[in-house]
Amino acid sequence: MLSYSFEDNKSPIYEQLYNYIKKDIMSGELSANTKLPSKRSFAGQLSVSVITVENAYNQLMSEGFIYSLPKKGFYVSDIFSIGMSLPTDKNLYKENKINRSSRNEKVIYSKVSVPYYVNQNTFADFNSNSADPASFPFSTWAKITRRILSDDQNYLMQNSPSNGIIELRFAISDYLEAFRGMNVNPNNIIVGAGTEIMYNILIQLLGQSKVYASEIPGYDKIDRILKANSVISERIPLDEYGIIPEQLTEKSVDIIHITPSHHFPTGITMPIKRRYEILEWANIGLHNFKDKYIIEDDYDSEFRLSGLPIPSLYSIDNSERVIYMNTFTKSLASTIRISYMILPDHLMAKYNETLSFYACTVSTFEQLTLAHFIADGYYEKHINRMRSSSRRKRNLLLRCIRESSLGKIATINEEESGLHFILRLDLKRNEKTFLEKAKKQGINISPVSKNSYMINYSSIPMDRIEEAVNRLSIAAFD
């Protein structure tokens, strides 16, 4: 019988229960396929509410620690395959909610490419990654810049270190520790003007003779960057759990770019079992004296709309195989070209030795402004406002779909993470005809698999959502 005590007053009871069960699963106390108590009986046993147990179970399911069977209950997932080593205590971490066990068909995402450009001539662009201009904190940004121009004139005239000013690197490190549970040395952070710059550095650091790979569907721009740098580039398809590990070996991949916390465009959250399989792939390479690395793109990680944030793959890597990468272009604005990556110790030492002669590609002024914006608590407030606004926008969009004629043929997936979800439509007409009619209605939308479409609502104003759904309904039926 499971029995836990709740003594930590700093965190919600459901989070404590979630951590207790997760720890027992990771340590082997709860073995694979063990049946967990029902929500009601467990709540009575622990003297907590049913919703507390439900929230804990949802969190565990979203990470892949447990699964549910209809009318049977909840069971512990078989996380570690034969041959995989059980992680040590420092691998224990926090993560979040999608029950994939209810899917009857095995989904393979491949061959479908989502354009990365923004169409400016549409009524509603569901492909656009841009932020709504109304969401940017102009007044706060202006206040910080005025203060810097007044108080830090001498500092502004100094050249930034190659990997970025220390103030910004400390601000990023503190933020990642507080809100992502990551223990990061500021000296391992490299700041640059966008993903392209980060990749140019990485390719020089890791070598052009390596085989690089990215997801398909995924960011086509990553593949273009790799090819522009004259390296061998592969595309690896996904199943419903994320990148397929076996294909990494089949295609002799050395470096893989993945988005495990919230994949673009499918919205998949990679479960814990698959995460360890990807790490195992990298570790096998290490044991065979081959340098294999995982570039973790933490896309959209700030915009988890329910439950706890999804922890990074970096958090459970004990072998220095993960290179963490993130950007402020999604959370602030696409025109603020500030990205960063975190290198393992041995790669940072190599960077300092061979590439630190490069000048930082972000001005001291921009770096210092962002450093103050984060350190003074404005970034946290901004993200909280963005989450609330995005949640309202998402809820309105889902309600409009549900109440429209689309509701009869629509299934929604992956709507709890990030600023997009997958809309599956049981169309009676040809998909090509549907897309053409949508375009005529001023709706830009792209498929991610057959009759499944990415709905990115980040750039669409609230007052256009209802009309956008009406136009999509016309495209589907008229």
Image: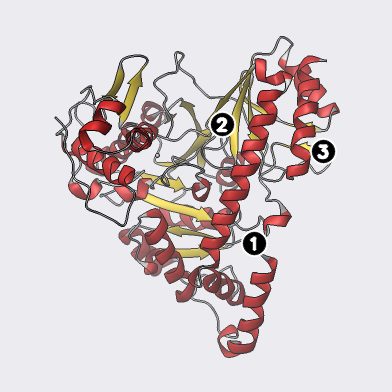
Q: Residues within 10 Å of mark 3 (few under 14, many from 20)?
A: some
Q: Amino acid at mark 3?
A: Thr
151 shown above or below 283: below
- The location of residue 41, given as percent across then percent down, is 25, 26
Q: Amino acid at mark 1?
A: Ile
| Pointer 2 residue | 217
- The location of residue 386, given as percent across then percent down, is 60, 53
Q: Amino acid at mark 2?
A: Pro
64 shown above or below 139: above
Q: Are marks 1 and 2 in contact (CB under 8 Å)?
A: no
- Name the element at disc 2: loop
118 shown above or below 378: above
Q: CA distance from mark 1 to mark 2?
A: 26 Å
Quadrant position of residue 455 = top right
For the image shown, how many numbered marks are present on the structure? 3
Q: Residues within 10 Å of mark 2 (few under 14, many from 20)?
A: many
In this view, the mark in front (2 or 3): 3
- Name the element at disc 3: loop
- The location of residue 362, given as percent across then percent down, is 59, 69
Q: Is residue 162 visible?
A: no
Q: Earlier in the sequence, mark 1 or mark 3?
A: 3
Which color scheme is applied?
secondary structure
In this view, the mark in front (1 or 3): 3
- Name the element at disc 1: loop
| Pointer 3 residue | 122
| Pointer 1 residue | 336
**Quadrant location, the C terminus:** top right
**Residue in front for this viewpoint, 5 or 342:** 5
Q: Residues within 10 Å of mark 1 (few under 14, many from 20)?
A: some
Residue at the spot x=60%, y=73% of the render? 363
Q: Is residue 412 visible?
A: yes
